[in-house]
Image (cartoon, helix red, strand yellow):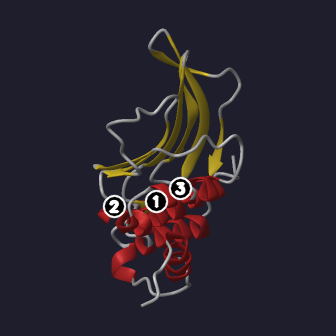
Amino acid sequence: MKRLSIRGVLVGLLGLLTAPGGVGAQEVKNYLVDGAHGKKMLKHELVLREEQGGIAGLTGTTWRIKPGGEWEVVHFRTVRGKEKEVASSRHGGTLTPAQLDELAEVLAAQDLKALPARLGPVSDTDPDVNPHRYVLKFGDKTTILQGVESRRGGDILENIKSCVPRAEQEQAAPLNRFGNVANQVVKQTKGS
């Protein structure tokens, strides 16, 4: 019997998850609703947060997409336990109706609402020094991905996928779904 590698399973799942089509209108309605004057809106605010721990505290980036499509990207750091925005790091814009539709389709295709509360390798014996993690929030749903290598400016999807070989095999599909949503948020907010 041939044994499958985690990387092989990952590649197969990623192909299935990113294949076009297959998302019904009902699934998209879990994420996109009709607002005032027939304007499509996200059902809730969508937030992706990347955090890097260090000796001086946390640094990171928050991508926020409001229900009407207004978005902002803010870089932050903690100073004496309080979060501070890095000077002149805020930028934003507004998603087009087509971009909102595309984002809702990705959220539905990746079944964001069904992601577990925690993802990534967990070790009681090897505490994570300078931890790097992602937090994804949509309404009441929060998923935290921990144990990811520092990104250092590279591609967010590749960074999240790098966590898969260290995670349990049953987490490969949820990690990919999380990565695909995170990638879409970054893409829709101009790749910041």
Q: CA distance from mark 3 to mark 1?
A: 6 Å
The residue under label 2 is 115
Residue 75 point in image, percent of width and height:
62, 31
Question: What is the quadrant of the N terminus in the image?
Answer: bottom left
Type of the residue with mark 2: Leu
Name the residue at 35% across, 76% down: 27
Q: Identify whether 136 is placed above or below 127.
A: below
Callout 3: helix, strand or loop?
helix
Q: Earlier in the sequence, mark 2 or mark 1?
A: 2
Q: Is residue 160 above or below residue 73?
A: below
Q: CA distance from mark 2 to mark 3?
A: 13 Å
Q: Is the residue marked by circle 2 packed among few (<14), some (14-19), or many (20+) residues within 10 Å?
A: some
- Establish if 81 lies above or below 11: above
Amino acid, disc 3: Ala
For disc 1, the marked residue is 178
Q: Is any atom of residue 34 visible in this view?
A: no
CB within 8 Å, label 2 to label 1:
yes
How packed is label 3: few (under 14 Cα within 10 Å), some, or many (20 or more)? many
Q: Amino acid at mark 1?
A: Phe
Determine whether label 2 and label 3 are within 8 Å by CB: no
User: Is 38 or 179 nearer to us in this picture?
Assistant: 179
- Which residue is identified by label 3? 182
Residue 109 found in image quarter: bottom left
Q: Residue furthest bottom?
A: 1
